[in-house]
Amino acid sequence: MRYARRTVVGFFAVAVVAALGVRTPAQQTEIKYSDVSKVPNPYRLVKGWPTLPKTMNGGHWGELIRVDTDPKGNIWVYHRCFNTEPEGAATCVGRTEPPILAFDASGKLLKSFGGGMFAFPHGFTVDSEGNVWASDASAGQVVLGKEPIAAAGPFKGMKMGGQVFKFSPEGKVLMTIGKPGVAGSGNEAFDRPTGVAVLPDGTIFVSDGHGKNDRIVKFAKDGTFVKAFGRHGSGPGEFDQPHDINFDSQGRLYVADRNNNRVQILDQDGKFIASWKQFGRPSGIYIKNDILYVSDSHSNAKLGNANGRGIYIGSVKDGKVTAFIPDPDGDQADVNRISGASGICADDQGNVYAADVGSHNLRKYSKK
């Protein structure tokens, strides 16, 4: 995630545009789903990347949920402890495998940590200083029918679930937000937090979207609650399962409003700017150099965007979809509840990475 500060000139330009009644990029007309069939796929799959050590589950992935890059160009993966239960149902409950892994650009494993700390890994990001943020989207003491939740390994006996952790790049816990094992809607508790994004000034945003809250929560750099905005619904500034969040270079917040089949754009106080439906039914959302990457892992003939599972790539400047990488298991869209990428990112060279939930895979794409 990258974020550039606005300049005074930028503010002036926006003000002039608004005064003249000219459309800003975030107000462009929505592009319909059928246009995706006309969009090229300029990417090729890089086979054999990364190299997962045989000592880790025999070198085979389980369910993955998110992926991100750090300032050094390393690739970080957040997965559900090599668990291979039915898609979307895998957890780390009772398991000690590390859910956080870091690879270098060649695909070599550099480090891993977090074993025994998480019940249901979900939200994930690496901030501009290289710190790692991860959310546990369990519903208090119950996750997917399994209870009670208790940490394993060196954390055995510790309550867990419903929290956001900040780690140093070496895996040291620097901050914890939320009450362990407690689901709530107040200032100090989450109900299954799904995503996290951090601005360069340290301001923290969390999407609280897999439970009943359907909101975005804003915190100061030290983790102090600032405000919450949004509620369940389909109107402007309302959400139905906000699944991931990210920022563009102007500091606008992009929300993967999954059950509403749209990307919502808001300011940092929750004021509605625009709604884009041309990027499918979004599970993951990522922005780098103002290129918007959105993954649709849910759509099928009856739900969301018919035959549109895959990775949508476009610009935050005009909302136009310029590339589309089809889900490799798209032919099973009407059979599998979830298939491809729930998490997505891109590196400085333009390579695209996809963390697959249903097909238990980490994909890397480079330009053809």
Image (cartoon, rainbow, N blue to C red):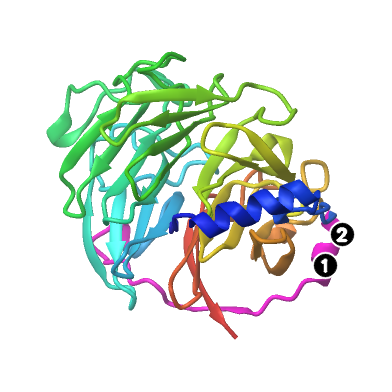
Expressed as whole percent of the image width and height from the top left, the position of residue 109 reads: 26, 67
Residue 243 appearing in the image: yes
Q: In which quadrant will I find the N terminus?
A: bottom left
Residue under pointer 2:
34
Does 166 appear above or below 49?
Answer: above
Q: Amino acid type of disc 1?
A: Ser
Left or right, 21 with reference to 347: right
The residue closer to the viewer here, 112 or 252, is 252
Q: Which span of residues is magenta-colored?
A: 33-58
Query: In the rendering, which numbered label is found on residue 37?
Result: 1
Q: Nearer the viewer, residue 353 or 225?
A: 225
**Residue at screen point 74% across, 63% down:** 320
Residue 38 part of the magenta segment: yes
Which x, y percent locates residue 282? 64, 47
Q: Could you tell me the amino acid type at mark 2?
A: Ser
Q: Residues within 10 Å of mark 2 (few under 14, many from 20)?
A: few
Element under label 2? Answer: helix
Determine contact: label 2, label 1, CB under 8 Å: yes
Q: Secondary structure at mark 1?
A: helix
Relative height, residue 364 to residue 274 (above, below):
below
Q: Is residue 364 left or right of residue 71?
A: right
Regarding residue 359, the answer to whether it shows in the image is no
Image quadrant assignment for residue 77: bottom left
Task: Give the residue displayed 50% in from the left and 36% down from the top.
Answer: 89
Quadrant occupied by the C terminus: bottom right
